[in-house]
Image (cartoon, helix red, strand yellow):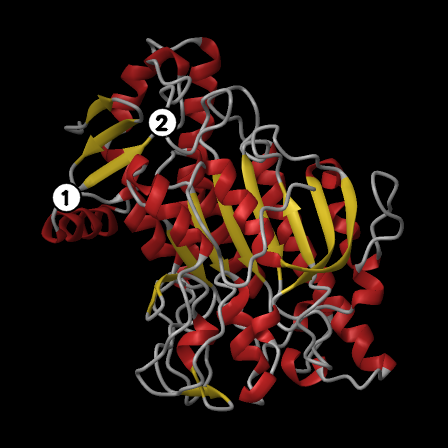
Amino acid sequence: MSEAKIEVGRRAFLRGLGARVALPGLSSLGMAKARAGVRGVTATGAPLRMAFLYIPNGVIMDKWRPEGTGKDFSLNKSMKSLEKFKGNLQIIKGFEQANGWAGPDGAGDHARSGATFLTGARPKKTAGSDIRVGISVDQMAANYVGSETRFPSLELSCDGVRKSGNCDSGYSCAYQYNLSWRSATQPMTPESNPRLVFERLFGSGSANERQESLARRRTEQRSILDFVLDDAKAMEKGLGRNDQQKLEEYITGVREIEQRLQKAESFGPPPKPGVKAPEGGVPNDYQAHIRLMFDMLLLAFQTDQTRISSFLLAHDGSNRNFPSVGVSDGHHGISHHGRKESKMAKLAKIDTFYSQQLAYFLEQMSRTEDVDGKSLLHNSMIVWGSGLSDADRHSHNDLPIILAGQAGGKFDSGRHLDLKTDLPLNNLYMRMLQEVGAPAGRIGDSTGVLKAV
């Protein structure tokens, strides 16, 4: 029998030995809405989430850009997997990150793409410790609404961590491997191990207590939820029918994720001589890795443990290959395609792969009910894109940007929006900060608040 207990406040938790499991919003526990006046909520009182999802090396725009504009548009070949979510999307043409262009700094466009994507600032060209770029939009939001949640923000990646060294033509690796920046000189290191993200979200107490809990679960082959399951069942009797179903679905989902993590760990590190093996919990399969990280993000949003996140699916300049879609060439290598049709066809397959991963996440977000009865996707602002459009030319304008979610009803979704100019991407970020109520005079080279979305 567990020793767990239920804690109810703005959020509810089941607490057991070294485990503190956050629950989804349950109206039976008085959690239907966030308090009026709380920062970062929608008009219905539900939390307003903000996520930034980055893909590397641009896209083949001819096969990515939708046909038609406004509400009357059709998705192109690379984005067909997003058809179901057209009504939840704004695909926006005309964004630029001007500080990504070479200027007097010369080569290093991949480093600048990653560094400028959320900061809009020009990174100092250095491979030393004197890195400098600017605070990122997610951290501006976290500084304002982060006190409302257990974690001010959540930084995720499918790449290993690199904080130093020369990665791109004299630019520090820190610029390519970090999307989020707490300050101009301090990146927010992302986590790439889904097991560690899971433990961070669902572990509590001192380090010794967490280690004791983990050791006990492994020894007895028990889930983290087994420590609190009896109490969950006891609590379930006092819930309404809808909340009972919601709690059961949530517990089942968490358990399934943990089982998938355990399965991934059982395969051990990939057999690549000369390459440091990843830590336990990192799947060998890239798609499985991406989707596990999306599942972690979904859980974090669903339990309101954070409302702000960034996810670097791969760093710009990544030379990963994609055998699952028939591309054995390195991504970065063929991104310099020189308009060669065979290379562009392979790149379009990679673009399709990434669109499918976004579709997976949007599916989970759209079918997860929020505390106000809407979906998590409805109450979110999700930016998906890259710091390059045409990687062959290292173009930092006409960026491939998707804005998903309705921001609780504030965004006019379901359209292909043509801005008809090169407008700072940071103007969109200014609008997103405005929606969460965060004050911001300027982000990078922003020229105002984008009202068109």
* Residue sitting at x 43%, y 16%: 243
Tell me: residue 257, above or below residue 273: above
How far apart marks 2 and 1 lie (CA) works out to 27 Å
Q: In the picture, residue 99 is in which quadrant?
A: bottom right
To which residue does mark 2 refer?
38
How many C-alpha atoms fall within 10 Å of the one at disc 1: few (<14), some, or many (≥20)?
few
Amino acid type at circle 1 is: Gly
Nearer to us in this view, 51 or 128:
128
Give the quadrant of residue 277: bottom left
Residue found 25% across the figure and 28% down from its top: 14
Secondary structure category for the residue under label 1: loop
Q: Which residue is mark 1?
A: 205
Q: Is residue 200 above or below residue 415?
A: below
Residue 444: percent from left, percent from top:
50, 62
- Kindly indicate the quadrant of the structure image that contains residue 37: top left
Q: Residues within 10 Å of mark 2 (few under 14, many from 20)?
A: few
- Can you give x and y, in whole percent of width and height, for residue 388 in the image? 65, 71
- Residue 233 appears at what percent x and percent y? 31, 19
The quadrant the N terminus occupies is top left
